[in-house]
Image (cartoon, rainbow, N blue to C red):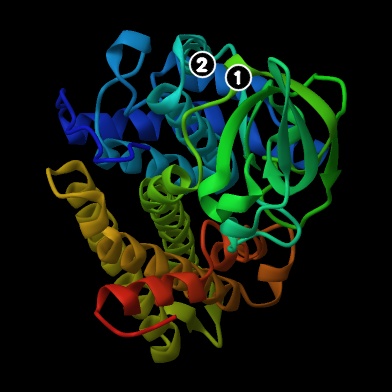
Amino acid sequence: MNQKKTRCPLKTVDRTQFRDMCARFAAAEIGPRWRAADRDKIFPRDFYAACARAGLIGITAPEDIGGSDLGAYEEAIAMEEMSKVNPNLAVSVLVQNVAGSILYDYGSPEQRDIARDVIAGNCLVAITVTEPEAGNDVQNVKTRARRDGDDWIVDGLKSFITLGGDSDVLVTLAQTDTSRGRHGMQFFAIDRRSPGVTCSQIETYVNRPAPTYRVQFDNVRVPERRRLDAGFKEIMTGFNRERIMVAARWLGHMQAALNWARDYATKRQQFGRLIGANQSIAFSLAQAHVDVEATRHLTYHAAERYDSDIPVKDVILDVSTAKLLATQAVVRVTQTALHIGGGWGLTEELPAMRLALDAMVAPVTVGSWEIQLRAIAREMGLPCN
């Protein structure tokens, strides 16, 4: 999350080999874990350690803190391949990479040490921004941080925080100067075990097994050294990279849904023939293929633009376009898979219902459809407020 411009990646890799590595990792490390973790509603901490060993935490981080110094393109590949197996364990990696980047891009030497521990798999972090009345409306964050000697006192309530209660550090956005509005916000790296921090899990149909929490701050004392030189502007800038990863997440998920639906349609028989021989089924699968490939093109195009020398403000149109299409298309594609599954698609014997349920979170994460449409309209030069 760079305020000016993302670093152009200093290293290159064979992307085909990198994709194969990510696919093998997902099959070996996500496949055996996610169902039990989903049933028990517990995040598998050993999965995070496995990601760190594989080098999938800190893909874009500099090498001097243990990162791979690659680009958003490679990060998107990893996200897509992991999401083909389970998009919710994949999003836990996204959270580590985005929160970690706040720490190493804007943090002090101590905060960069936290980022180093994140990349090494020794410290789990959560991004604590969203509030009950400030989801898309980040500029109206109500959590307050007031100075008290050499410390800050933080009070407020955050909601829908992925991994909030599982984390070691909460990278938290708070108002430090209400007279400055959105420009009076700053991030704090808060120890989750600090007195006054309370986390309660929100029961959801989606995002398992990456649990979602409310996080309450009641007179939480935070040392000045835990304040970051980052606030509203930096989180809004960072949303660009995060939205590319969100698009890659749903690209992988819809590819998995299409693969399953196509295979099922070539095996399931009704009225004496394969259901894939019916024009309505064949055409719906063809449309799903178009959605997947269009999303793939826009996602990786946005990633390439993000990794280039182009200023961040000039990639907003590409990023929002990719993110909007991905979050719309994944709903269509997974609904197609559910429909093709028929009555059996509603049972746990087939994956169709779970594929469709997991996609339901897509329209509202990291900027709703309406937020993306507004950004696109503004980038088109339309007077949209």
Quarter location, residue 286: bottom left
For the point 19% across and 36% down, the residue is 16
The vertical placement of 274 against 244, above or below, is below
Check disc 1 and give the amino acid type.
Answer: Arg
Q: Position of residue 131 (x, y in %)?
A: 71, 53
Q: From mark 1 to mark 2, how far is it between C-alphas?
A: 7 Å
Is 217 placed left or right of 137 in the picture? Answer: right
Q: Quadrant of the N terminus?
A: top left
Residue at the disc numbered 2: 111
Check disc 2 and give the amino acid type.
Answer: Gln
* Residue 232 in sight from this viewpoint: yes
SS at circle 2: helix
Query: Which is more foreground, mark 1 or mark 2?
Result: 1
Is 43 placed left or right of 257 in the picture? Answer: right
The vertical placement of 298 against 74, above or below, is below
Residue at the disc numbered 1: 226
Front position in the image: 46 or 195: 195
Front position in the image: 300 or 36: 300
Asked if marks 1 and 2 touch (Cβ < 8 Å), the reply is yes
Quarter location, residue 279: bottom left
Is 94 placed left or right of 351 in the picture? Answer: left
* Residue 266 in sight from this viewpoint: no
Count of all numbered marks drawn on residues in the image = 2
| N-terminal label among 1 and 2 | 2
The vertical placement of 249 against 98, above or below, is below
Q: Quadrant of the C terminus?
A: bottom left
